[in-house]
Amino acid sequence: MKIRALLVGVLLVASTTSALAAGPYIGAAGGVSIFHDSDENDTILGTTDTREYDAGYGFNVSAGYNFDPVRVEFEFGYKAADVDKFTVPGFSVSGAGSDATVMSYMANVYYDFKTKTPFTPYIGAGLGMLNGEFKDLGLDFKEDDTVFGYQFAVGAAYNFNKNVAFDLSYRFQGAASDFEVAGFEIPYMSSNIMAGLRYNF
C-alpha cells in the first residue's frame, strides 16, 4: 500500500508540473562557449591565417511569449573567448593578450514537445545581428564589426511548476558573413552549452 501511495503521489506531482503556463515569460542562462577555430583572410598581405581559441563563456537573457507549444522570443547574448594561438604561413605565434567577444540580438522561435512528465524537449532557430569585437596581441584598442547572424538550438526544460522551469540547451551560432576588422576577414561560429531558469507569468 505504501508503494502504491508513493507512485500515486509521484504521478500527481508529474501531472501538475508537466506543462508551463501559456503567456509571457523571461529567462536567463549561462555556460560554456566554444568558438570554432577559423581561417581568416589577411586582405593586406593576401595570406590566410588560422585563429585558434580557448574555451570561453557566455550568457543569454530573453523575453518572449509562450503560445503553447510554440514560443517566440527576443534574446540578447554575450560570448567571449581568449585566442590560444595564431598560425600564419610557416609558423605559429601565441595568442596571449588576444580575445574575441560577440554580442547577439536574436529573434527566436521554439517548438516544445509536450510529454506527460515534467520534462519538455524543444528545438528552435533564430535570426538577428551579431557584433564582434576583436583584440589582438595585447593592443590597447579593439576593432569591431556587425553582421547578420543565425542560430539553432536543441534542449529540454524541467518544469518545477507551471511558472518556473530549469532549462538546459545546446546552441550553435554563426555569422552569415565574415567580420571585417583591421584588414582581416574573420569567420565566426560557436558551440554553446547553456543552463538557466525560465519564469512564465
Image (cartoon, rainbow, N blue to C red):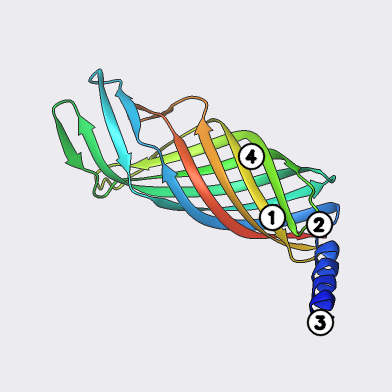
Cα–Cα span, label 2 and label 3: 30 Å
The residue carrying mark 1 is: 157
Task: Give the spatial CA distance, label 3 vs label 1.
Answer: 30 Å
Q: Residue 117: which quarter of the image?
A: bottom right
What percent of the width, then of the height, locates residue 32? 47, 53
First of labels 4, 2 by sequence position: 2
Residue found at x 52% / y 26%: 176
Quickly name the residue at label 4.
Answer: 106
Residue carrying label 2 = 20
Kindly identify the residue that appears in the image at 51 percent across and 56 percent down.
31
Residue 2 tag number: 3
Judge depth for marks 4 and 3 and give the one in front.
Answer: 3
Mark 1 surroundings within 10 Å by alpha-carbon count, few (fewer than 14), some (14 through 19), many (20 or more): many
Is 146 rendered above or below residue 101?
above
The image quarter containing residue 162 is bottom right
Q: Is residue 188 visible?
A: yes
